[in-house]
Image: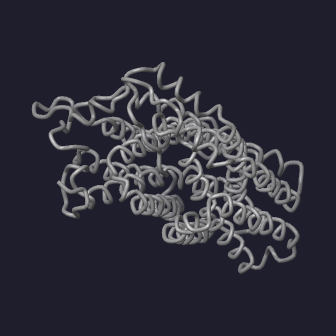
Amino acid sequence: MSTSKLNFSRNLSSSAFSRYFSFSALYVAQGIPEGMTYFAIPAWLAANGKTPMEIAAFLGVVGIPWSFKIIIAPLMDRFTIVSMGRKRPWIILGQLGLISSFLCIGLIPDPLNNAVGLMAAGFFISFFGAFQDVATDGMAVDIIPINEQARANGLMWGTKTAGISLSLVIGTALINALGFSVAISCLAIAVALIMLVPLYMRERPGEKFMPWSKKGQASKTAKKTQLRSWKQIFKSLYRVVKLKSSLVFIIAMFINGLMLGLVDTLMPIFSVQELGWTNSYFSKVFSIATLSSGLLGMFLGGYLVDFFGKIKMMTIYLVLTVALIVLFAFLTDLWSIQLVMYGFIFIYYTLSTFLTIAVFASGMHLCWKTVAATQFTLFMAVSNMGRASGSAMLGVLKTNFNWDIVFLIIALSPCIMLIIIKFIHFERHRVKVDDFDIPDGKLAVSSIVNR
């Protein structure tokens, strides 16, 4: 059956429409925990007088599980219920974990003054969000044909942005209107509804819907591509990661994550406590900016990278980001003008979105397809380590410096990254990777984890 057909099918491998719909829905589910933990809850804490140090501590903790993806990815490649598909069982487990975590955080007594409980629950929301992220990306690269990947990635990127934005706006409105516990419970219902998608769909024809289903068996494709050797996974990963461009890119990913963590932590604190915005007002402005930038990225980001080149576009985005942050740091007298703040938020997140698309494309180019899922997850884990570090650093920086100095310090991250990316040589790296001998036997071809 042609994979280009747009008819609806319960088998993802048989219908392009089913693939687009299913992965878009699952990426919305990925955006919900990020929108709540990284933006809605910090804005709520800021609106209730919590210090930057306290808010940064919360964000530092919830950012940690995203670094665990490097442990989760090879685990999912190594083990699964093959009769249900290679990644679908893991997606269902991740969705169950998300639902349970949202329900648990809603049961925390006095969450505003229970920092330990709030951080613990936030940690588990992030853990299962990262869990679901790895599983969804793994299934996407197994199922989506090459000729559909660009369109699918655009849809997934946009729907994840929509999930972040909508969960921020709706979550904030529900917190303010109904209280923290009820608001979180409502989001658990939304995640539960999305779980119907992986429950209803299956990867390939003939597979089981559930482990206890009497009908169904593992497809030949799933059996052929399932990994069975830890030694080959990690030996091949080491072989490609030790190359110069891979090592340089890992450093660049950490620096990029550091900037993202600093700015994402700063935004709700700065806007609420420095500018006097309400958490509801911040959520609306931020959601509009991120949703708009996500849509622009969907339609332009990949095209610009393909047309002008990865290094050139990353350089342009980083130069513009440095200029924007430094300029804003020196315009302290204009911070109270809403149009100036609107412009800064919109331009920064547009540049950040386009930079992220270029960075992900660069990571894909550096991957060896034999271990690409685990290799790309390693890149993402390092970025998330940087993001968690940036979140934690913000509290220390604000305790010791004024906001204008904090912005100038943040501008150092893209400056450093500008220098680092000049040492990445895609063609030389590609030649070396293409010359690698494919390990015999048991290592399957794992594709790149697309974001």
192 vs 219, nearest the viewer: 219
Any part of residue 109 in sight: no
Q: Quadrant of residue 119?
A: top right
Instruction: Tell me if residue 119 comes above or below residue 172 in the rendering.
Output: above
Identify the residue at image location x=84%, y=56%.
Answer: 406
Instruction: Tell me if residue 232 comes above or below residue 121 in the rendering.
Output: above
Which quadrant, please, contains the N terminus? bottom left
In percent of width and height, residue 150 lies at 43, 60
Identify the residue at image location x=28%, y=51%.
Answer: 197
In percent of width and height, residue 139 lies at 36, 43
Please indicate whether residue 237 sits to the left or right of residue 206 in the image. Answer: right
Which residue sits furthest left?
A: 215
In percent of width and height, residue 47 lies at 67, 59
Q: How is the image coloured?
A: one colour
In percent of width and height, residue 206 lies at 15, 39
293 vs 35, nearest the viewer: 293
Please indicate whether residue 260 sits to the left or right of residue 215 in the image. Answer: right
Identify the residue at image location x=65%, y=31%.
Answer: 242
Q: Quadrant of residue 379?
A: top right
Identify the residue at image location x=85%, y=59%.
Answer: 408
Any part of residue 110 in sight: yes
Please indicate whether residue 440 sits to the left or right of residue 255 in the image. Answer: left
